[in-house]
Image (cartoon, helix red, strand yellow):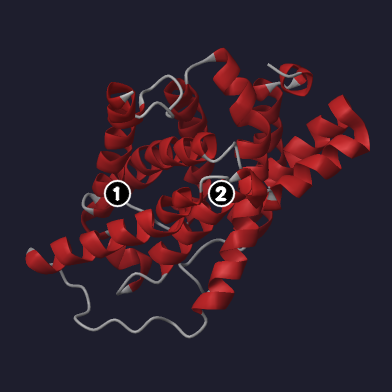
Amino acid sequence: MNNSTSKRSPLLFFVLVYALSIPLWVLNAIYPMKLPVDNLPMTDIVATFSPMVAASILVYREEKLLGVKNLLKRAFDYKRITKKVWYVPIIFLMPFIYVLTYVIMRLVGLPVPAVWNPPLLTPLLFIAFFLAAAGEELGYSGYVTDPMQVRYTALTASLIIGLIHAVWHFPSMLSMGMTPGLFIWGGFVLAVSFRILTIWLYNNTGKSVFAAILFHAVTNTGRSIFPGSRSAFQLYDGAIGYGLIAITAVIVVFLWGPKTLTRFRYARKAA
């Protein structure tokens, strides 16, 4: 355990993230404004940077300005990804799940478009989601994941961070009028499964925050340009799409092990 990680306080981080977000949730409740994309509350633009701001405040307290600079630089620490094969799941895992979701929905006769035309603004949408993902992952991956993994296994850290992050999304989900089923699938199941996959990629790419950010951005972009939009992906309370993501997370835990998510069981047998 390095010295900077030992100084970090996950509890203070989570408390500060919520403290920074609560005024924005109250503001949205009083003056609700929605983004044209996915019907998201306007205040989500600011709230999504709460983890980065919280991490920066705590790092400054612990390591001063140099520590904050080093934290922010990790948004582009792609040189940590020495095994380039990991770009395959980072970039293609979630799109594959979305394609599989679409195929299943078509096979069972759910109302999704037969023809898909990707929005012309998809590149700009990806850039926006990349910036938003940096706002979250510089906190969740760059600050709190390592000290959580020192205290617990990678799986337990994923469960704790995922559950806390799920609750953090609830005010926005309420504002968007989501059904109780989506609170379960889109809230707990997706948040926990997504965090397992993110920490799996983070640990296997030399603890690259850039890997986590890119994976996060691809995930949100793909869900937003899904045929028929995100609402189509969430048909029947997200049981198909989010269920597939959860199954993928279970497979990852089984194959790479819950302790570190890095010990591929068949590689160990071969060795």
Q: Is residue 31 visible?
A: no
Q: Which mark is residue 242?
A: 1
Report the residue at 51% width, 63% height from top.
Answer: 40
Q: Nearer the viewer, residue 155 or 33?
A: 155
- Against 146, residue 107 (above or below) is below
Spot the residue most to the front: 271
- Against 105, residue 243 (above or below) is above
x, y percentage for residue 140?
A: 61, 37
* Residue labelled with disc 2: 211
Position of 129 with respect to 10 (left or right) is left
Check disc 2 and give the amino acid type.
Answer: Ala
Spot the residue most to the left: 108
Q: Nearer the viewer, mark 1 or mark 2?
A: 2
Q: Secondary structure at mark 2?
A: helix
Check disc 1 and give the amino acid type.
Answer: Tyr
Position of 85 with respect to 240 (left or right) is right
Q: Nearer the viewer, residue 158 or 187?
A: 158
**How far is mark 1 from mark 2, CA to CA?**
21 Å
x, y percentage for residue 173?
A: 45, 51
